[in-house]
């Protein structure tokens, strides 16, 4: 069994539970992510996301990903999970486990995945990649990339400033 501890911002322990994690999860290479409603916790395994109900400590669902997972992000207002791996980002509807779309971040650098982060208002998705020229910003309304040049053009609209993103 593996123990999971949850603290609040003040450092007070809110809860602890044990769970039988899949054998391929390395606790030193696992991403943890709370759902937007803070009722479930997601852990990344090499090729899957394990969703745990915080109240019971039980695995409630598993999402299969295409390859080794590099990063995850939850949309702040919707039931969406973005998962980055290789040259791609997959967008899932958490409640149904449905893969909604796959974004190709870099066809040139397959295998060098990066992070993923939604803007605080959920209108944009940022995919910082290992190679700066592969970094992209996507509109979440239609999953189209917004063009920008690297290094970042500081004359961009105010809606695309550094404070817009929370990078995990």
Image (spheres, rainbow, N blue to C red):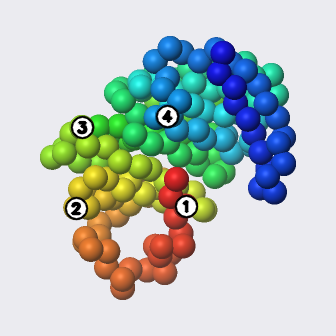
Residue 159 seen in render: yes
Residue nearer the viewer, 1 or 128: 1
Residue bearing mark 4: 28
Residue at x 29%, y 37% (from the top left corner): 86
Front residue (pair 96, 89): 89
Where residue 133 is drawn, which disc sits there? 2
Res 94 visible: no
Which of marks 2 and 4 precedes in the sequence? 4
Q: Secondary structure at mark 2?
A: helix
How crowded pointer 4 is (Cα within 10 Å; few <14, some 14-19, many 20+) is rated as few
Q: Earlier in the sequence, mark 3 or mark 4?
A: 4
Whole-percent x and y of residue 138?
40, 57
Q: Is residue 81 left or right of residue 109?
A: right
- Residue, x 59% and y 18% (percent of image)? 21
Assess disc 3: are there few (<14), some (14-19) or many (≥20) residues with their C-alpha within 10 Å of its C-alpha. Answer: some
Q: CA distance from mark 4 to mark 2?
A: 29 Å
Q: Position of residue 8 (x, y in %)?
A: 79, 50
**Mark 1 element type:** loop
Q: Which residue is label 3 attached to? A: 111
């Amino acid at each position: 069994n593996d123990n999971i501890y949850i603290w609040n911002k003040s450092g007070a322990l809110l809860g602890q539970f044990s769970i039988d994690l899949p054998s391929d999860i390395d606790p030193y290479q696992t991403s943890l992510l709370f759902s937007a409603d803070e009722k479930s916790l997601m852990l990344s395994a090499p090729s899957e996301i394990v969703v745990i109900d915080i109240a019971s400590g039980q695995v409630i669902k598993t999402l299969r990903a295409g390859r080794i997972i590099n990063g995850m992000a939850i949309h702040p207002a919707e039931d969406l999970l973005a998962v980055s791996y290789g040259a791609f980002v997959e967008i899932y509807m958490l409640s149904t486990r449905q893969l909604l779309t796959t974004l190709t971040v870099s066809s040139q650098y397959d295998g060098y995945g990066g992070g993923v982060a939604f803007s605080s208002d959920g209108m944009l998705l940022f995919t910082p990649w290992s190679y700066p020229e592969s970094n992209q910003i996507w509109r979440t309304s239609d999953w189209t990339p917004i063009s920008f040049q690297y290094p970042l053009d500081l004359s961009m609209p105010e809606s695309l400033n550094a404070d817009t993103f929370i990078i995990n």
